[in-house]
Structures are given as structure tokens and as C-alpha cells.
Amino acid sequence: MKIPRLGMNAFKAINKPHGIKRRWLINSLTVVIAVVLIGVVAYSVSISAYYYSGMRASLETKAKTASEFLQDYFSRTYAEYYQTAYAYAERFDERDRIELQFVSAAGKVEASTYGITAGTHPGTPEITEALDTKNVAVWSGKSPRTDERIIAVSSPIMTSNGRLIGLMRYVSALSEVDKLVALNIGAASGIGLLIVITVVSANLFFIRSIVAPVQEVTAMTRAIADGGYGARIENKYGDEIGEMVESINEMSMKISQTEKLKTEFISTVSHELRTPLTAITGWSETLLYDDALKSDTRRGLSIILKESRRLAVMVEELLDITRVEEGRFTVRLEPTDIELLLDEAITAYEDVFRRDGIQLEYIPADDPLSEIPGDPARLKQVFLNILDNAAKYGKSGGKTVITCNRVTEDKRDYAEVTVRDFGIGIPEDELEFVKYKFYKGSSKERGSGVGLAVCDEIVKHHRGKLTIENASDGAGGVEVKIRLPMT
């Protein structure tokens, strides 16, 4: 029976919960983060503009109003300008927040609410602009003197005849405004982060309600793929997931019923075939002892005996499969000489290999292996089956190499038998299915497709491992390894 590739891939491609979670979060969070980021940026820009523009407008208004008010008191003499500026600076009542400076037409600070700046030349761009344009000018940046962020507004002071006599300059530190802006941006970012966390939490809660049943369905489909027919999932869902669970349960039960009918049919037919095959084999062997048989008759009886024996082996394999499915398959372990069993199997197949023109090479272990716990009859059955496959599928290679060695893995000793042919190998897309019962893939060779499934079960009952791989040395062919624990 060839397993449909689509069906097998469906079991592998069953939705992975982590994949759903990742895709869902990426898709939803991308939109949410983009919206939150745009909102935070927009708010940050607007709040910065609000505070900085507000401060600028306030200082411009103060400077313009004060300069227009004071220019009526200034005469044409510079001495009077200096005295008036000094007196005004002394009476300035906002000195704790704003520094008021009177700057000469040469850009020199003549009077200031902060005495230490008097006599200095700030040299900031807005002073030059105000002196050149005779209009209010604003500048913000790092103070050349203190290296702190400031905003400065310079407003021209004109005499009555329109002559520029100096500038009234307001200077204020931006540290407090920077703190307010940073605090607002931080609050907006915190709210944005809280929104993202809330969305993530809500999505995770929703995803969990989807992922949990998907995980349960995944486990069930894997169990069915591994032969656990008839298992059911408790249906606790009233939506589309509930419909899917119900469909899975129905599928599982139908497969279980079909498998049960098939197993019963195979078991019944196998038992019914065993009796006539035994009679045919027995009578064929008896008749061959008759010396009076003609050559053609003897040849015909030999063919009957050979084919009846082959059918008997197939019947036994089918019976073994039914025992496995019904949980009645057992092995009887006893001290076993694995090298002796392998030698007997090779001897039994020497004629077959010779007749097919296949060179048979056996490389025994460097040191004799000690006896292992095993079922001699079952292990010999495994060796014979593997050798039969090598003879059938390795004909084109003209050679089969058998080795027997002791290997150690995880501080435990194993006896390992390797059978390597040099045939065409197994198609890569069929390799993982060769141990499935009734699987023959694209092969046209004779056989029921259950031999390797039985061998795998026998090796598992010995706590061993049967691996079938295409040879990795580039010479073609298949390499079969039978690894059995030595204790």
C-alpha cells in the first residue's frame, strides 16, 4: 500500500502553534506599533512646539513692548541711555527667571540683571540680526559663555529721530522647558508602551484560546499518523474549532474501524492460507523423494515447493503484523551468538547472491562478540529479510558488503550489523516511509511490503534500532544498520 504523499505531508504541515503566535503578533503589532509611534511622534512635535513657541512668543512680546516703552525716555546721548538702562535693569522684577541685558550698538552688554555679564560681547546671531535689520530677532542654542541651552530675544531701541541706540535683550535658560518637554514625551511614550503591552496581552490571551486546541488537534493527528486509531479529543468548543475537532474524532473512529476490519481480514486469510500451504509444502517435499519422477515433473514440483515456501513466509509476516497491531507480538530473549546467526543467514543466501551475480563480502568483527540477549529465531528473521532486500534491490550494483562490529554510544556497548548494497538506492522522498507496513513505494519488485515493518518491530522489542539510509559515500546503494544492545 503506497501512502499518499499529500496525506503524509498534511500530518507534518499541521499548523505549528509557535508559528501562529509569531505571525499573529507580527501582523497585529506592526499596525499597533506604527499607530502608537506616529501618535507619540506627533504629540512630541506638538508639545515641543507648544512650549518652545510659547516661550519664544512670550519673550518677543516682553522685549518688543518694553523696548517701545523705553525708547520714549532715551535721549540722543549715549550716557543717558546707559543710565536709564542701568536703572531699569536694577528694577527688573523677573530676574529669577529671565536675564535682562542692554546691549550697545557695538554688541557689548552695557547693563544686565546679572552683573557678571556686563561688559561682555555675547556674539550670538540674533544680536547681529537685530542690529542689522532693526527688528526683533530670536535665537536658541548653547550659550557661548555657559554652554547651556538658552533662548535669546533682542529688540532694537530707537531714539525719537529713528537712530538705533542699542538693544534690549532677554535671555532665558531652556533647561526647565526641556524638562517639561521630556516629561511630556516620556509620559506619551509610557502611555504608548502601555497600549502596546495591553494589545499584546489581549492578543496573547486570544491566541492562547486558538493555540491550545490546535496543539491538542496536532497531538491527535500525530497519534493517528503513528497508528493510534480510535483516539478522541474532548470537544469543548462551540465554534469552527469544535467542528474541526468533531471531524478529527469522526475520522479517527472510521480509520479505527477500517483498520480493525483489515486486520481481522488479514489474520483470517493468513490462518486459512497456512493450512493448505503446509500441505502443499509437505507433499511437494515428499513427492520429490520419489526417484521415479521424470525431470519435467521434478522441476515442476521444485517450483511448487519454492513458491509455497515463499507464500508461507509472506503468510507468517502478515500474521506477525496482525500480532503487532493487536499487541500480541513478543520475543523470547536468551543468550544469543549474533555472529553465528548472521553467518547462518549469509550461508542460506549465498546461492541466491551467486545466482544473481552479486559478490557477497562479509567482514566479521575484529574481536569475537560476546553473546547478547536476543530471540534467535526473530533475529535470524531480520537478517534473512535484510539480505533478501539486498539481493532484490542491489542487483545492479553487483556487490553486497556485510560487517559486524562492536560500537559504543553513551557509554553503552552495542552489536551493530551493517548490510550495504551498491544498487540504485531509495528515492529520497520515499526513504522515510520504507518501514511503514504495506509500503512499497515506486518499487516493482515482488513482496508484500511488510517485511521491514516486522523487522523494525523485532529490533524495537530488543531495545535496538533499525536504520535504513542511502549510502553517503557517493557510490550509490542502501546501507542498513541493525544495532542491538549487548547487555
Image (cartoon, rainbow, N blue to C red):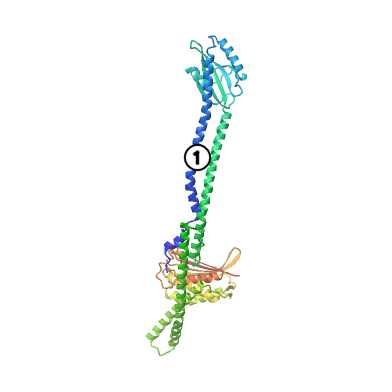
Q: Residue furthest left?
A: 296
For label 1, the crowd category at 10 Å Cα-Cα, with few meaning under 14, some 14 to 19 and many 20 or more, is some
Is disc 1 placed on a helix, strand or loop? helix
Locate residue 195, reporting x and y percent.
53, 43
Q: Nearer the viewer, residue 118 or 144?
A: 118
Locate residue 330, reporting x and y percent.
55, 74
Q: Nearer the viewer, residue 364 or 30?
A: 30
Q: Is residue 146 visible?
A: yes
Locate residue 471, reporting x and y percent.
47, 64
In the picture shown, does residue 187 fall above or below 122?
A: below
Q: Nearer the viewer, residue 286 or 166?
A: 166
Q: Which residue is found at the position 42% from the left and 79% from the top? A: 307
Q: Is residue 350 visible?
A: no
For disc 1, the marked residue is 37
Split into 4 quadrants, where in the image is the C terminus?
bottom right
Q: Is residue 357 left or right of residue 59?
A: left
Q: Which residue is found at the position 52% from the left and 46% from the top? A: 199
To which quarter of the image does residue 273 belong? bottom left
Count numbered badges in the picture: 1
Q: Name the amino acid, label 1.
A: Leu
In the picture shown, does residue 376 fall above or below 60?
A: below
Q: Residue furthest front?
A: 238
In the picture shown, does residue 203 fall above or below 214?
A: above
Locate residue 136, reporting x and y percent.
50, 20
